[in-house]
Amino acid sequence: MPRINHGVRLLAACMQQAGADWYRQDFPLIGYLFKYLLAAFLALWVALKMEMDQPATALLTVVIVMHFRSGMVMTKSYYRLIGTVIGILFSLLLVAWFAQDRFPFFIAAALWIGLCTAGSLVYRNFQSYGFVLAGYTLCIVGLPATLTPWHTFQIASTRLSEIGVGLLSAMLVSELILPQRLWENIQAVLRGKFRDFSQLLGAGASAGLNQPFLKFMQDLYQLESFRASVQFETDDARVHSTTINQLNVRFMAVSTTYVVFQRLVQRLQAQGRSHEANALLALMQPLAEAVLIDGRPASDAQGLARLQQAVTDFQLGFTALFSRHLQALATLPDANRLEVETGAELLQRLATELAAYLQTYVLLVAHPHTRQVDRRAFTADQLHMHIDWLPVSIAAIRGALTLLILAAIWMTIDWPSGILAMTLGVITSTLFAASPSPMATIRQFAVGVLLGIALVYVSNVFWLTAAHDYVMLCIVIAPAILLTAWLSARPATALVGAGLGIAYFLMVGFNQALGDNPVKYFNDSIALMIALVVSGIMFSLTDYAASPWAKARVLTQLRQLVVDACLNPDMTATAFEMQARDLIQRSGNVHRPQDADSVRMVEALCATLEIGHAVIALRAVASDLSVQPRKLLQHTLVLIAHYYKQPGQKNQQQALQWLDHFLGWLQGGEYDQALAAWQAQPLTTQLHFIRLVIAAEASASPHPVLKQEAAYAA
Amino acid sequence: MLHEWIPRELAFLDAHVPTLFLAFLLAAVAIWLLDKWLAAWNLYDLVWYPALLRVALFFGLFSVFGLMVY
């Protein structure tokens, strides 16, 4: 009997566990499907009740803005509304100006689409989305209006109402029913990032620094995209928007310093100076031990408090520890004291930045209810953007050309579904402009569109003819909606879902009259295919990000950033760091951590950050010096900038010689009148560090692509 | 009464817009401001279902404005 009892209890425990797992993992998805259906049915009901022309537009709007997270739906809807209103205003203008002649009309439309494509590439997150919709709206309002210009205003106001109905239903349903809050996601990312970084700090990286660094960078941008959507949340996320921003900036600083420090140690080891390298590692040891408690990162409030205390202790005891190590090192014959001092300075910076990061982290994770960073107290706002106008203009030209080609086909063969083709062409060329590998994206999207076309056939021919009332209509569209929702909820098939939803609701046959019209069906299907083919060809012809030339350009731009850091007095460390990271992020080469290319890019980024921060720190030192040493420092900066502008043996030698000369002057103690000893010390270590970095550039190949080009020229 | 004073439709750039639409916009802006204020003072911590409160407040305010028109 007790055995049976035991068995029953075990079974109950298993069932409970399984139930909890199901509730945590699968239930949200089912809830999401349910919400999706409900939002679509609500939109359909309202649109039919108000006798709008195209209830399908309202449904399409729901499909476009629905998202797993409630805050995301609000943000998406907000930008969709703005994009739509601007698109409608422009359509009205365009029809008013050029309704009588199609050539100027299409030229102006192409310019508009080019502008929208450029905008969607320049801006991030859902702001980019607003531009996509401003372009798309021109197609659903402006183009139909050209056929009947006297109805333009009516078309515009009806489309706007339909879209409004779709937006309102999507927002209402996702806010009120089983809302999925962003705050949990944000906290999960924050904790994950802290865990990874603690492990890296405590245990060191086994497989190189580049991959962890890449991972941190991606987390950073993910967090930023969440943060962009918290304005419409009701929970803690919105209150902490500024705090999250501060955490991001501080994390960026501490992770960069750590990478720079480790690169210094690696460089020393590679040069066979193991005494210095070991001394530096031993200096860091107390910090590494404090970060991991029993081999695990701190997770609760007490652990974090202890960690903060340990970091403070480390900072306080650092000078004593450092002088002990220096004494030990002095007994060795050929030890270079300066290199250890350079590393020690980096370590002190690391400890300071770690303390700052921990302070914000504890605030967010342990006491989110009590305090937050005031917006006025922290103004290093926004991630600085680095915009490269070449890919942006290529994308703009591509968008405009896609529209013009489709328009030309429409006009020459007088084809009834031309508007639909142009609509899809514009959607694809604006929506995927920022995609790192547009061909793969288009292919996935095309699979979705084909599925949608097949589904429309079944719906239109077999099911819609039997739909006599609202409930039947709901049943007819339910499979397509469920499939779209399910596909788009999974990241791997999100694009297939988007293609399916867009194609289905562009073609489904219950606008104006219910039922099927085979001729229209085939025309529309062919239109969608032609649009896909044309934009696919355009994307493959202008696939800028994949070309080796683009990569060389990114490397050159990184060097240019170093030049800016040397010569531009307004460049702060945070701005420099953000621009460099944004440049790499946008280049689209860092989405696959296993890729050789992306590792090389991150390597280049780390090298840039290393020298850039050193140069900016040097400039900071220069600000409170007297005239003579400041002049010398200016000359140093100019030489470094010159080397980074035109990398080459000669310029490098020139910079190195000057640095040697300068260092000799500083170490010789001839600066008595010009400098105080406390000023000379940081200057010496900083200059020495820069010298190390520049000298290391020689052993690494300077510029693989340049080398290739040089070989080709020879 | 107020509704005798307010027209049911307004001419906006020669296009007739229902006054109700204006009331809708007004209510949306008012709720947006109120919402910012509620969030800044952590008043949402006292509410069981913040989203529901927000929607309910909006519909309440919209109805008040709407009843002023009709």
Image: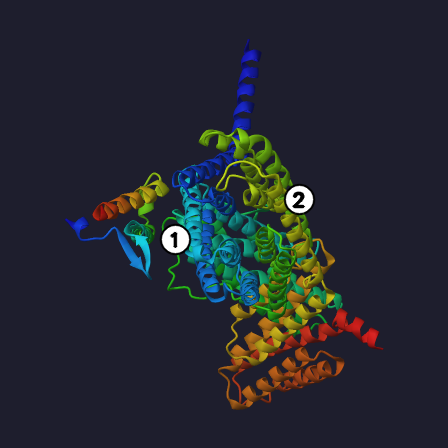
Q: Position of residue A402 (x, y in %)?
A: 63, 60
Q: Position of residue A249 (x, y in %)?
A: 50, 62
Residue A508 visible in rendering: yes
First-in-chain label (1 vs 2): 1
The image quadrant of residue B55 is top left
Q: CA distance from mark 1 to mark 2?
A: 41 Å
Establish if A58 lies above or below A147.
Answer: above
Q: Which residue is identified by label 2?
A: A447
Nearer the observer: mark 1 or 2; the answer is 2
Which is more toward the observer, A581 or A293? Answer: A581
Q: Position of residue B25 (x, y in %)?
A: 32, 53
Residue type (three-letter) at the residue carrying disc 2:
Val
Q: Which corner quadrant holds the N terminus of chain A?
A: top right
Establish if A476 lies above or below A693.
Answer: above
Mark 1, other Cα within 10 Å: few <14 / some 14–19 / many ≥20 = many
Q: Which residue is identified by label 1?
A: A239
> Is label 2 in a helix, a strand or a loop?
helix
**How many dots with numbers?**
2
Chain letter for mark 1, please: A
Residue type (three-letter) at the residue carrying disc 1:
Val
Residue A321 visible in rendering: no
Chain letter for mark 2, please: A
> Is label 1 in a helix, a strand or a loop?
helix
